[in-house]
Image (tube, grey):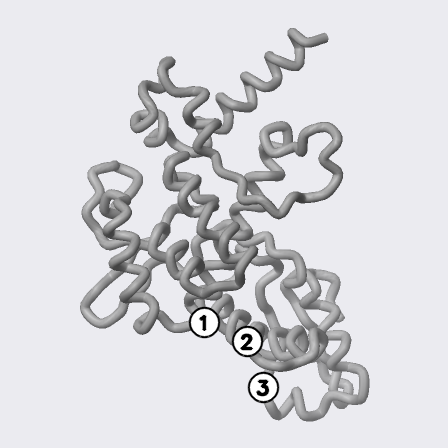
Amino acid sequence: MAKSKSVIDIHINDKVHRFKGPADWNSMSRKQLLLWCGLGRQHLSIDSVLTMSGYLFYNIPKSIFSLFKAGEDLAIADKMKWLMENKLTNNLIGKIRIGWRVYYGPANRLSNLTIGEYRRADLFHQMYIKTGKRDYLLALAATLFRQKGGKSVDDVRCELTENGVNSRARFFKWALHPTVLKAIQLFYEGCRADIVRRFPIVFEKPEGEAKQTESISDLEDTILAYSGGKLGNFDETSRTNLYVFLNLLKQKIEEYKRNKK
């Protein structure tokens, strides 16, 4: 095997066959992400899924793959183990076309979301994780992916409304392919984990809370707490950019901790 994560060298009959593929989640193509989501829906072992992903991502011809000796496929699986930790933060999905309708997704790292939009998306995600009900995952997709109509220079999506989310979720329920829905879930979860890593002080557990509670965490109280100041009332604060809000919250927490000493 080659040392580079993005290169696989296969030795067959004293000849080296070199294949290139993605080195991490964000270097995948849209097609590769959907292939991974499709493989994940099959009833296969982890090693089998990783081996198949390597075979597909690196475009290894069947004629070469069929010549693998016993155990060589496990080397391919080992090469793909980076897939076991979701670090997807780029919107590889881009936009979704269903018939004549086009739905546009958020920017990489969810960087053009407002704190209000993130709050809604995270509530749906938490409800999906807690209940396993697909309707919540559809509502998450309907929150993030919207038709064109926005006035913001960095966001073409139409305004987020409850009626709009409900309408899109009903449409997605029968029109959105399960593999695409899974890709949306992975994109959101990768971004969410990245946000927690970037702002650990904001998401740290209170003292004495060793285990994650089963209750649903709602950012509404946090948004309310910062309303009325320079960010404006609750509605205006809710329209503040996600990262601007989290940076402000981080500064306030750090200031509070300094003054507490």
Asked whether the residues under the numbered discs 2 and 1 touch, taking CB atoms below 8 Å apart as contact, a structural biologist would say: yes
Disc 2 secondary structure class: loop
Residue 41's label in the rendered image is 2
Q: Amino acid at mark 1?
A: Thr
Identified at 59% across, 69% down, the residue is 20
Q: CA distance from mark 2 to mark 1?
A: 8 Å
The image quarter containing residue 52 is bottom right
Q: Position of residue 126 (x, y in %)?
A: 52, 50
Report whether 13 appears left or right of 35.
Answer: right
Q: Position of residue 184 (x, y in %)?
A: 44, 59
The residue tagged 3 is 61
Report whether 190 appears left or right of 119.
Answer: right
Q: Earlier in the sequence, mark 1 or mark 3?
A: 3
The one nearer the camera, 21 or 185, is 185
Q: Amino acid at mark 2?
A: Arg
Q: Position of residue 174 (x, y in %)?
A: 32, 73
Disc 3 secondary structure class: loop
Q: Amino acid at mark 3?
A: Pro
Residue at the far front in the pictured view: 215
Asked whether the residues under the numbered discs 2 and 3 touch, taking CB atoms below 8 Å apart as contact, a structural biologist would say: no
Q: Nearer the viewer, mark 1 or mark 3?
A: 1
Disc 1 secondary structure class: helix
**In the rendered image of this protein, does residue 171 appear above or below residue 24?**
below
Q: CA distance from mark 2 to mark 3?
A: 23 Å
Residue 124, visible in the rendered structure:
yes
The image quarter containing residue 195 is top right
Residue 27, visible in the rendered structure:
no
Residue 179's label in the rendered image is 1
Q: Earlier in the sequence, mark 2 or mark 1?
A: 2
